[in-house]
Amino acid sequence: IRIMEGRNQMPIVELILVGFGNDPELQPLLFLLFLVIYIAAVPGNLLIIVLAVPDRHLHIPMYYFVANLSAVEICYVSTTLPRLISSLVTGDRTISLYNCLVQFHFYVILTNAECLLLTAMCCDRYLAICHPLRYPTLMNGRVCGHVVAGCWIFGISSSIMIHIFILQLRYCGSGVFDHFFCDFASDGQFCGETRTLTVVTIFLSVILNIGVFLITLTTYICIIASILRIPSSSGRQKAFSTCSSHLIVVAVYYVSTIAINIFSLFRPLAIVYKIFSVTSTVLIPLLNPLIYCLRNKEVHQSLRKALMKLVDFRH
């Protein structure tokens, strides 16, 4: 790694994550808020995994993807929130530049994996509703495993590619990082030959943001068109219920992602960017278990069976 220097040519080895300010009255409230979110998000997503693994009724592609998405969300929220919660308690906002790069590395991996998994779930619902007879063949266990592996491979390889170019540059940004986690896409500035890094970043952003969004949009247009062609109202309601949970998660994800990308072009106030970042990095991992646990009868039945087994075991 090259020596990373600031604008005054002094080596920068630590950054200060500003977070949400220094208001002494606001800090305890933010601490409680993010602590409650973290305590709810991690066990909630873990509950989905625990229910999906042993229950054969949930051994279908949709819940296979949901369980993997929950694993991503646990890692995702654990990448950003513990450091923020710790800084709110101790008041220590410093983080080494290397640790900041590591956090950004995992953030990129998990962001890409989450985006691709949501797209895979969208394609799964498309095949289930639009091609029900061919669905068992097109979306079997082997295919699901390859799809999930592909999501992780793309996420890891793209992050490694970006960091190879970053580590060849010098950090010449400010030592004060006005964010609550290390998102160099919003605030970091690197000096040197940055053309290749810019091209790679734009290419990956086009694939993930524009390409995947168009695939998701087209797929749901086809899904809604197929549902509307179902003659009975009960059939339409049943078909829509199979994809409504995923549609809510996708809608929240893309609204926050598009808002972040649009606002970043106009260089808004830092607090605006942070609020939308909280939506994508904190609220979505919290909403995921709530939506899938509250809206799915299969999950309700699996939870009921698990509780009955726990009661029988205690007696």
Image: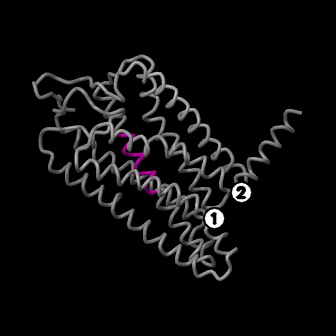
Q: Position of residue 167 (x, y in %)?
A: 23, 37
Marks 1 and 2: in contact by CB < 8 Å? no
Type of amino acid at the residue the image marks with label 2? Glu
Going by the image, does 59 lie left or right of 306? left
Name the outermost residue toward the left: 8
Q: Nearer the viewer, residue 227 or 63?
A: 227
- The circle drawn on residue 298 is 2
The crowding category of the residue bearing disc 1, from other C-alpha atoms within 10 Å (few below 14, some 14 to 19, many at least 20), is: some
Picture residue at 49% right of the left edge, 43% below the top: 283
- Image coords of residue 306 (percent x, y): 77, 44
Which segment is the magenta one?
105-116
Q: Is residue 33 above or below residue 273?
A: above
- Up-down relation of residue 155 to residue 6 (above or below): below
Q: Amino acid at mark 1?
A: Ser
For the stretch drawn in magenta, what is the main secondary structure? helix
Give the residue drawn at x 24%, y 27%.
Answer: 176
Is-magenta flag for residue 218?
A: no
Compare residues 128 and 170 and report the one nearer the observer: 128
The image quadrant that residue 9 belongs to is top left
Residue position for label 1: 241
Front: mark 2 or 1: 1
Question: Does 61 sit above or below residue 7?
Answer: below
Q: Quadrant of the C terminus?
A: top right
Give me the residue at 19% from left, 33% from top.
Answer: 171
- Residues under labels 2 and 1: Cα distance? 12 Å
First in sequence, mark 2 or 1: give its number.
1
Q: What residue lies at 37% left-to-right and 18% top-to-bottom?
A: 92
User: Residue 199 at x, y = what percent?
Assistant: 20, 54
Dot 2 falls on a residue whose secondary structure is helix
Q: Is residue 108 magenta?
A: yes
